[in-house]
Each structure stands twice: as C-alpha cells, then as structure tokens.
Image (cartoon, rainbow, N blue to C red):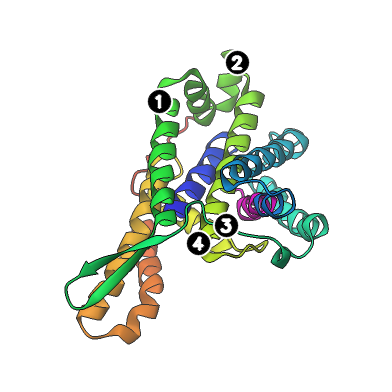
Amino acid sequence: MCVTAIVTLAITLIFRTSFTTNFAQGVISAFGAYVASFVITKWEFPVLIAIPVSMIVSMGVAILVDVGLFRRGRYVNALSKQIITMGLISIVTGLTPVIFGEVEQYMINSIVKDNFTIDVPGDVDISVTYNALVCVAITAVIIPLIFILLRYSKWGLSVRATASNEYIAGMMGINTHVVTAVSWGLAGALGALAAYMRASEVKVVTTYFMTDYQVSAFLAGILGGFSTFHGPVICALLIPLAENLVMAIFNILGLSELTRWSKVIIYAIALVIIFAKPQGIFGKKIEKKV
C-alpha cells in the first residue's frame, strides 16, 4: 500500500506538469533499486546511504528524460508523449543489465532487520517486520510533506499554475521548464525510494518488478481523478484496503477459494465507478471556451 501510494504520487506529479502518463515510471524506479543494491554489494555502502544515492541517480535519469526528450517535444500531443515513455521502457530495460549485469550477485538488505509477533484470538500469530513499519513511517512523512509544499511553497504554486495552464503560467513569468524538470526529478527519486522499500521486503530486484505497482497507480489515478493531486493518492491507499476487505469477507463466509478473485472484483468495481464518473471520484469537470 505504501509503495503504491508513493508511485501514484510520482506518476501524478509528472501527469500534472507534463500532461502525459509516464509508462516508464516502473523501470526507472527499478533502475534506482539496482543502483542501491550495487553500491551496497560492490562499495559496501550502508542502506541509509545507498537509498539516497539511488534516489539521486534516479532523479538525474528522470531529469535527463525531461530535458533531453520531453522538452524537445514539449507541445506535441498526449499520444506522442505516451509513445515516448513506452520507448523509454525498452531503452532502460536494455541498458540496466548492460550496466549492472546479473542482479543475483547483489545484496538487497532490509532498512531495519528483525520482526515481532502479535498474538490475536484464535491461536493465530501475526508476524510484523520492523522494516515494514519503517516503510509506513517513511510514507507517512513524505506524502504529507509533499502536499504541504504543493499547497504553501513557491514551488507548489508554480506546479499548480503549470498544471492549470502551462501557456498562461509561462506568460506570468513562471519558468515551466524548471517546474517540469523538478517534477520529473522528484518523481524519479520517489520511484527509487518506493522500489527499494519493495525490494527490502521481497529481497529481489528485476527490471519489471515494479510493473504491478505502476498498473495499480494508473488505476488509482483514473479512479481518483488525475485532475487533482490528492485524489489518486487517496485511491492508492483505498484500493489495497478494499482488496483485503473482500478477501476477509470471503474467508468469513467460508469461501476462501474465491480470495484469488479479490483483485478482479475490485477492478470490476473500479470500472463501474469510472463509467459512472469518468473524471474520477475526486476529479472535476473541466470546461473550455471555444
């Protein structure tokens, strides 16, 4: 849930400032996890240094994408921009094994080791890792912090102005080039952080291991409404909760064999909601004068 929320926020930042869905967010995030695992294994960096290093590298990659590609095709249509990001998937996935080789030789360390057990009624023990709690704490700090900056800082005002109308924002003196570059860089850094949070739990990194979270982030964005910053993030938190609720209901009813359909049921419910409200739950209709 935490990983999905962070990835969703990263994708929303890019969508709102560059007006495109970044299909390459997953592979750029995975690239950051490769960087972290590389510096841990080869250079023996501690995790608390490796993660910021991976975030900085992913930030640089994302900014390079914006400056080198999107800035040159700044006012092309949305479909062309999406095709560019799809091409980036092939480029990043092709370069990653060339740069890092086989990932099996690298270490994926937990941010914090050890776990504890919670006793619940019914002779069932729940094991919780301290690493998971740290990931929750990181998410609980970073996401509100970014929303505070979006609401009250000069950077946030520039982002909201660019998201509202890039042409007018530029005419009012806002450097929209800097706004989009910073948004891409922040999205890259957030993606790398989310990727390592995930890798620290599953102990594996592949070029496509963040794809499922990217798909869930797109669903959350559409369901919440890409016309807002908060809507997609709220839905990114609600979707996993709803899925777990459906699984719990099936287990209570003695239909545990149906739990594997929980994701399908949630996606079907989301589809119905989108049909009923195409702009998203929190989205607003945008009317333009012609």
Of badges 3 and 4, nearer the viewer stands: 3
Residue 23 shown in magenta? yes
**Dot placed on the residue nearer the N-terminal end, 4 or 1:** 1
Amino acid carrying mark 1 in the image: Arg
Q: Relative to 16, is 225 on the left or the right? A: left
Of badges 4 and 1, nearer the viewer stands: 4
Quickly name the residue at label 4. Answer: 201
In the picture, the disc for residue 109 is 3
Secondary element at tag 2: helix
Which percent across, then down, holds residue 288?
Answer: 47, 32
Q: Relative to 288, is 166 on the left or the right? A: right
Q: Which residue lies furthest to the left in this view?
A: 121
**Dot placed on the residue nearer the N-terminal end, 1 or 3:** 3
- Distance from the alpha carbon under mark 1 to that under mark 2: 22 Å
Which residue is pictured at 63% across the width and 45% down the height? 50
Quickly name the residue at label 2. Answer: 171
Of badges 2 and 4, nearer the viewer stands: 4
Depth check: 128 or 174 in front? 128
User: Mark 2: few, some, or many residues within 10 Å (few <14, many ≥20)?
Assistant: few
Q: Which secondary structure is most common in the magenta stretch?
A: helix
Amino acid carrying mark 3 in the image: Asn
Q: Quadrant of residue 127?
A: bottom left
Secondary element at tag 1: helix
Q: Relative to 183, is 177 on the left or the right? A: right
Magenta-highlighted residues: 22-35
